[in-house]
Amino acid sequence: MDQGPLIRYKSVDIYQQALGVLKSVDFELRQGEFVYLIGKVGSGKSTFLKTIYGEVDIAEGEAHVLGFDLRRMKRKHIADLRRRLGIVFQDFQLLTDRTVHDNLSFVLRATGWKNKAAIEDRIREVLELVGMESKGYKLPNELSGGEQQRIVIARAILNKPAIILADEPTGNLDVETGRNIVELLREICAAGSSIILTTHNLNLLAEYPGKVYRCEDHHLAEV
């Protein structure tokens, strides 16, 4: 049964620091979809993602994410929304002073996990999923860029999010490593999470087809 869209934007205007970034945005994301956002640097891709997790406010229009009304949502509910999203940043944002295992454990505890055995089981599961089961004891700086990005993806899927937002996840990686990361995200998508991925690498679109939206001239349109 179709639950309806996980994300639905209708005639949305997005501003950042009083500048109009995107206007009249219509966008939908459904269960199991893999969506690319393309466009030049500064065209609004990252800002668009930030509206989805409540970092940037929406000025006009209707915007719903996982049942939350972004225009009317109270600040205190942003944490509830973010718990149901997985976010993959280009620059990793791992805690550099703790091991991979402790990075993941930190997130689980911060999102309400209490049972030690359950925490250990979940960490083991996600590390296996991303092919990093033997790296839990390492510090982030002991890992390659591709390995760090796999850990970031492991962190993003800890709470089995309905949606994963991946902002240029291959931007700092060589071509082969970048492809491996996209393949991993495709597997996660096939297992049930919907994914929005911003990228400059148009070769990926040919190799791993998905729905494509382009940010250009303050508009977001399906290609």
Image (cartoon, grey):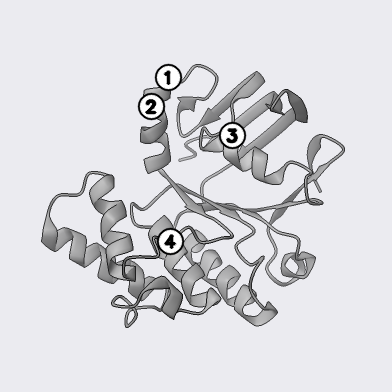
First in sequence: mark 2 vs mark 4: 2
Is 67 positioned to the left or the right of 211 in the image?
left
> Residue 186 placed where, x, y %?
55, 65
SS label for mark 2: helix
First in sequence: mark 2 vs mark 3: 3
Is 128 drawn above or below residue 169 in the view shown? below
- State the CA–CA distance, disc 2 to disc 4: 24 Å
Residue at image mark 2: 77
- State the CA–CA distance, disc 3 to disc 1: 14 Å
Is 96 positioned to the left or the right of 29 in the image?
left
Q: Is residue 155 visible?
A: yes
Amino acid type, callout 2: His
- State the CA–CA distance, disc 1 to disc 4: 28 Å
Residue furthest to the right in view is 217
Checking the image for residue 74, the label placed there is: 1
Amino acid type, callout 4: Leu
Q: Residue at x 56, y 71 (%)?
A: 181
Of labels 4 and 3, the one closer to you? 4
Residue at image mark 4: 94
For the residue carrying disc 3, how many other residues have a C-alpha within 10 Å: few (<14), some (14-19), or many (20+)?
A: some
> Residue 85 placed where, x, y %?
44, 45
Q: CB atoms at circles 3 and 1 under 8 Å apart?
A: no
Residue at image mark 3: 51
- State the CA–CA distance, disc 4 to disc 3: 22 Å
Q: Residue at x 20, y 66 (%)?
A: 121
Q: CB atoms at circles 2 and 1 under 8 Å apart?
A: yes
SS label for mark 1: loop
